[in-house]
Image (spheres, rainbow, N blue to C red):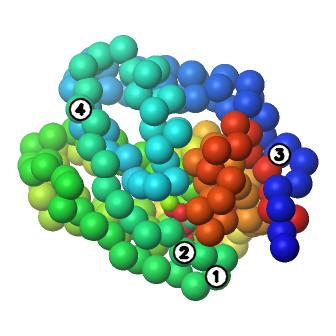
Amino acid sequence: MKTPGKTMIGRDQIQKRVEELGREITEDFQGREIDVVGVLNGAFIFLADLVRQLPYTCKVHLVRAKSYRATSQSETIDLEALPDLKGREVLLVEDILDSGKTLSVIMDKINQMNPKSLKTCVLLEKTGPDREVLRADFRGFLVEDVWVVGYGLDMDENYRNLPYIAELV
Ligand code: IMP
Ligand code: MG
């Protein structure tokens, strides 16, 4: 069975980068009210840390996307919990951008509500030749195309509680 290997991105490194992302987002939105939409389950820890770096009023919503296990991908997205985002400035927060499918499905649904703007923030983005389709507006770290766990990211619902990010080996 595969288990988390040595630390790839440490706790302090994550915290520092999340603080920087908070500043980038704050500067970009210039005090305008943001509707932050976090994608469950993977983004729950990143989302919690990130919104605490935003100094202005913001609303926080959650949307559930069923993550795929290893290779079999699922695009089951439950958007019922979302309010009407018409005319709102939306920041979509996801744990990791791989093929970009999950994010683009959610973005399509949000765009159907005619938000004023829609931007994306991901903690991690996988590099690779087939992953140039969709790039996040705000990104924490670029990672190699390996399976990573920790800080919210899982393998079969395990390892989300690790305070750092590691490759599953
Ligand atoms: P995409 O739709 O291919 O971009 O895949 C993104 C989704 O797959 C994320 O929301 C994660 O839930 C999951 N995912 C992709 N790569 C990893 C990984 O390395 N570790 C944990 N989850 C991952
Ligand atoms: Mg996810």
Residue type highlighted by circle 4: Lys
Residue 133: in sight, yes or no?
Answer: no
Q: How crowded is mark 1: few (under 14 residues within 10 Å), some or many (20 or more)?
A: few
Instruction: Give the Cα distance between marks 1 and 4.
Output: 34 Å
Q: Residue at x 46, y 20 (%)?
A: 53
Q: Which residue is denoted by mark 2 in the rendering?
A: 68
Res 79 label: none
Using the image, determine if residue 64 lies above or below residue 123: below
Residue type highlighted by circle 2: Tyr
Residue type highlighted by circle 1: Thr
Q: Which residue is denoted by mark 3 in the rendering?
A: 8
Give whichever of discs 2 and 4 has the lower sequence position. 4
Instruction: Give 111 or 156, whichever is nearer the viewer.
Output: 156
Q: Residue at x 58, y 85 (%)?
A: 72
Instruction: Give 105 or 131, whichever is nearer the viewer.
Output: 105
Give whichever of discs 1 and 4 has the lower sequence position. 4
Using the image, determine if residue 84 lies above or below residue 36: below
Q: Which residue is denoted by mark 1 in the rendering?
A: 71
Q: In which quarter of the image is the N terminus?
A: bottom right
Q: Is residue 118 left or right of residue 20?
A: left
Instruction: Name the quadrant containing residue 107.
Output: bottom left
Q: Is mark 2 on a helix, strand or loop?
A: loop
Residue type highlighted by circle 3: Met
Give whichever of discs 3 and 1 has the lower sequence position. 3
Whether the residues at callouts 3 and 2 have beta carbons within 8 Å, the answer is no
Residue 156, how many percent across, how many down? 62, 69
Q: Which residue is denoted by mark 4 in the rendering?
A: 59
